[in-house]
Amino acid sequence: MTTTYFTEDHEWIAVDGDTGTVGITKYAAEQLGDVVFVEVPDTGKSFAKGDDMAVVESVKAASDVYAPVAGEVLEGNEALADAPQTVNEDPEGTGWFCKLKLAEKGELNGLMNAEAYAKFCEGL
Amino acid sequence: MADTEKTDLKRTPLHAIHLEMGGKMVPFAGYDMPVQFEGVKAEHLWTRTHAGLFDVSHMGPCFLFLKEGLGAPGSHERIAALIETLVPSNIAGLKPGQGRLTVLLNSDGGILDDLIVTRMPDPALEGMLYIVVNGAVKEEDWAVMTRELGASAGLQRADDRILMALQGPDAEAVLRPHFPEAADLSFMRCAYIQKDGEKYMLSRCGYTGEDGFELLLPGNEVGQSFVRTLLDDPRVKPIGLGARDSLRLEAGLCLYGHDMDADRTPVEADLQWVIQKGRRARADFPGAAKILAQLADGPAQKRVGIQPLGRAPAREGTEIRVGDEPVGVVTSGGFGPSVEKPVAMGYVRTDLAEAGTAIDLIIRGKPHPAEVCALPFVPSNYKR
């Protein structure tokens, strides 16, 4: 059973048990424009909630991607190195950035569900 | 600029059209300007293959003219002698209707701005120059011109009009039905056109590396409806500031305030070609001693093209190293949609300025390999 949570910085995390897959939302990808470069974190690296975890660059600018919750990187999406445009094509699917082993599941309570996030974006 | 209130921003005469076309607006040089319409990459590629329409009304078009003796014999030489006290280029030698890129210099030879100076094509307007300066520094430029030349020359600013660029391989075909003069102009030539009581300046130049035109037209409904007519042409799309930047970077063209500024001379900026032979011999421009010494001995640093070898773009401010030694800085960098890789330019120590020199770009604390390279990244398509 997978549940997806969203942050105010436009990351999503799809949680299944103790593992979460992280990416940026469709809204973020549209705002960024054409993505030309992605740097995903190395396996084994640990992050606190809110740490700079990855970098996404569009034709316009470089943006940091923050860890939505604390965790250790199980895997980075290496396919993005050669196909960064995947982030535009399928941001909430194959354009995922990394998989995390969650350190503190309670942190998920501070995130939004899909409905709340959609409302949040409408207000922007 | 980030904290500028939207309400403080000026609007060009094309502002309403940008909104209608779905432009995403940002503050730029004090104006509310479109950064993109459809998307930077699509707009960039469209301009290289069709025709892109750019609103550059935020820039500083103006006319500098003799207060006395306009149209009299020798009046071009007189206005040229005046402007040549501020710029190192040969303005006297321009033919009627010919324009030239030059730089406004301070007394240390630093670049206050880059500008295009054009001799008016009309014999009745001999003694008048059409000058376009950068939007971000136009007030400062005009203050210098008025202070230094105001006793003999008048300055009429034209930044209440529309200044637009139409760039790309279809530009001439699009403009010709409206301005047949377009077909007769070669690169850096200008026509002065009077039609239905309105005045137009049509120049074959631009900032994309493509063939194209810049057109100064009235800032009223006549000008606005002309722009709408062009946008109705299926070969034409509106282009925002984002693609303007990626196009000029691929074309190896400098952006003032980034790739050159008051701390850089034209020799350091690799723009020594704007200083023609006669001016070097006469050594009569601001900062001549320093500039001529740099021409003879080479400057300490020089602007170069930079080709990152990986996929990570190097942005402005990125440090350049060889080994552990800092040797320069990136002044413009991003992704080139036409070359489909990152592109950059910056300053390096002159002994490293040779194309092919291996350098490292320090991106987020890590060295990324790159090479000094020749500019431009894409061949120019100017109509010579």
Image (spheres, coloured by chain):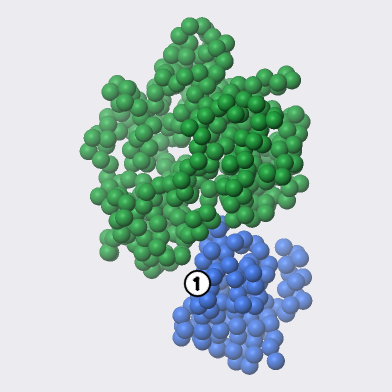
Horizontal and vertical percent for residue B92?
42, 18
For residue B24, say whether it is visible.
Answer: yes
User: In the image, is residue B165 above or below residue B150?
Assistant: below
How many other residues sit within 10 Å of disc 1, few (<14), some (14-19) or many (≥20)? some
Q: Quadrant of residue B299?
A: top left
Give left or right: position of B260 versus A63: left
Chain coloured green in the rendered structure? B
Q: Looking at this view, is A79 or B319 the one in front?
A: A79
Q: Nearer the viewer, residue B22 or B68?
A: B22
Q: Tell me: A7 left or right of A66.
A: right
Chain under numbered label 1: A
Q: Amino acid at mark 1?
A: Ala
Residue at 38% x, 37% y: name it: B271
In this rendering, the answer to whether B351 lies above or below A117 is: above
Quadrant hosting residue B94 = top left
Residue B217 location, x and y as percent? 66, 28
Residue with the mark numbered 1:
A81
Q: Is residue B201 visible?
A: no
Image position, residue B187 (x, y; %): 51, 31
Q: Identify the residue at image location x=62%, y=31%.
A: B215
What secondary structure is marked by label 1? helix
Give the answer, above or below, for where A50 lies relative to B55.
Answer: below
User: In screen coordinates, is B14 left or right of B291?
Assistant: right
Q: Position of residue B81 (x, y in %)?
A: 41, 17
- Which residue is most to the left? B297
The residue sitting at 46% across, 46% down in the picture is: B379
Chain (blue): A
Give the mark count.
Answer: 1
Residue at the location (28% across, 64% down)?
B324
